[in-house]
């Protein structure tokens, strides 16, 4: 009986090793057949398996860099992705968590988010330029009516930190404070300076300046109607109460702008691809193609 148990143990170990064979070494990591067996199952040729293996090598290199840069997805990002996954499949989050492959879903989400964050991190300083010739060659768009956009600057305050007012009276304290700021700005004080000093919104660092906004809602139309240096009436936002001024305006062709963004996106992807190729060239990689 003892010998039989030994034989069964050895047989089991042999089967386990055969199903989880090391097929590549990437720096200090190993890639096994089990790590992406589902992809290998759908490969119909040796060349397809090699392509899949190379993709797995690239993923391994990128995940190492994510750890090196300390940009791993946090719990909030992972949970947000899980909620989206549940909604897209018309199930609740608790139902998703009870799925037998939930752990695999989490691993795939973490991997996907990691790759997205790494590409953003590497390309964040890359500012692709688009020449007029490139635009003419790639964006054959008929002239259309321009759409108006504006930029505004806001001072958003949620509470007066040094106020003795009760919570229920905070609104009155904030509104009173913004009224004082508005009067000073109307007399020539710098909106940008006040925004940097007093705004409690993340945009404070650049003087409360917004991105370009399409003039396509009643609220934006109100901002658009402001005259130079005119301060808006106090209004409520999700982050508190606010005042704003109109900073700039322009007219754009949405189709042309979309085409430009597509070209810039392609250039950015090419930049990242070249970076990844350099990363691969500097890595230690050994492939055991005969094991596929």
Image: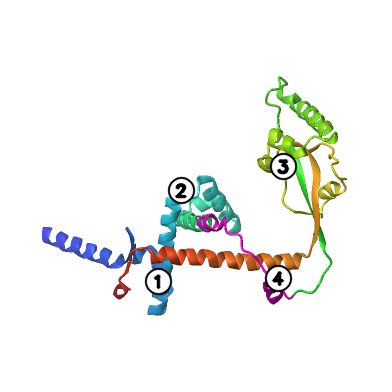
**Magenta span contains residue 125:** yes
Which residue is disc 2 drawn over?
Answer: 70
Q: Position of residue 198 (x, y in %)?
A: 71, 33
- Nearest-to-viewer mark from 1 and 2: 2
- Nearest-to-viewer mark from 2 and 3: 3
- Nearest-to-viewer mark from 1 and 3: 3
Q: What is the distance, in whole Å, between disc 4 and disc 1 at their CAs?
A: 45 Å
Which residue is disc 3 drawn over?
Answer: 208
Residue found at x 46% / y 48%: 70
Q: What is the distance, in whole Å, between disc 1 and disc 3 at their CAs?
A: 52 Å
Q: Position of residue 150 (x, y in %)?
A: 79, 52
Picture layout, residue 143 above or below residue 156: below
Q: Earlier in the sequence, mark 1 or mark 3?
A: 1
The part of the chain drawn in magenta is: 118-140
Q: What is the distance, in whole Å, between disc 2 and disc 4 at their CAs?
A: 39 Å
Residue found at x 70% / y 71%: 135
Disc 2, disc 4: CB below 8 Å? Answer: no
Badge 4 marks a residue whose secondary structure is: helix
Q: Is residue 1 visible?
A: no
Q: Is residue 129 visible?
A: yes
Badge 2 marks a residue whose secondary structure is: loop
Q: What is the distance, in whole Å, between disc 4 and disc 3 at their CAs?
A: 32 Å
The label number, if any, that marks residue 40 in the structure image: 1
């Amino acid at each position: 009986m003892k010998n039989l148990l030994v034989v069964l143990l050895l047989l089991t170990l042999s089967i386990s090793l055969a199903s989880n064979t090391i097929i590549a070494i990437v720096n200090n990591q190993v890639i096994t057949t089990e790590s992406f067996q589902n992809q290998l199952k759908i490969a119909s040729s040796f060349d397809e398996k090699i392509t899949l293996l190379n993709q797995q090598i690239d993923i391994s290199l990128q995940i190492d860099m994510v750890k090196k840069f300390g940009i791993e997805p946090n719990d909030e990002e992972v949970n947000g992705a899980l909620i989206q996954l549940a909604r897209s499949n018309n199930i609740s989050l608790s139902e998703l968590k009870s799925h037998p492959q939930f752990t695999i879903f989490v691993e795939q989400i973490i991997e996907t988010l990691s790759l997205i964050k790494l590409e953003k991190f590497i390309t964040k300083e890359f500012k692709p330029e688009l020449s007029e010739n490139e635009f003419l060659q790639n964006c054959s768009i008929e002239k259309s009516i321009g759409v108006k956009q504006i930029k505004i600057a806001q001072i958003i305050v949620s509470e007066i930190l040094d106020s003795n007012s009760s919570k229920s009276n905070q609104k009155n304290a904030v509104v009173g404070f913004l009224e004082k700021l508005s009067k000073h700005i109307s007399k020539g004080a710098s909106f940008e300076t006040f925004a940097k000093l007093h705004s409690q919104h993340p945009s404070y660092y650049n003087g409360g300046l917004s991105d370009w906004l399409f003039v396509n809602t009643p609220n934006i139309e109100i901002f658009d109607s402001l005259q130079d240096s005119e301060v808006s009436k106090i209004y409520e936002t999700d982050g508190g109460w606010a005042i704003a001024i109109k900073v700039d305006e322009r007219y754009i062709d949405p189709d042309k702008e979309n085409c430009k963004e597509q070209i810039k996106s392609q250039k950015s992807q090419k930049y990242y691809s070249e970076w990844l190729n350099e990363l691969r060239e500097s890595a230690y990689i050994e492939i055991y193609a005969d094991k596929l």
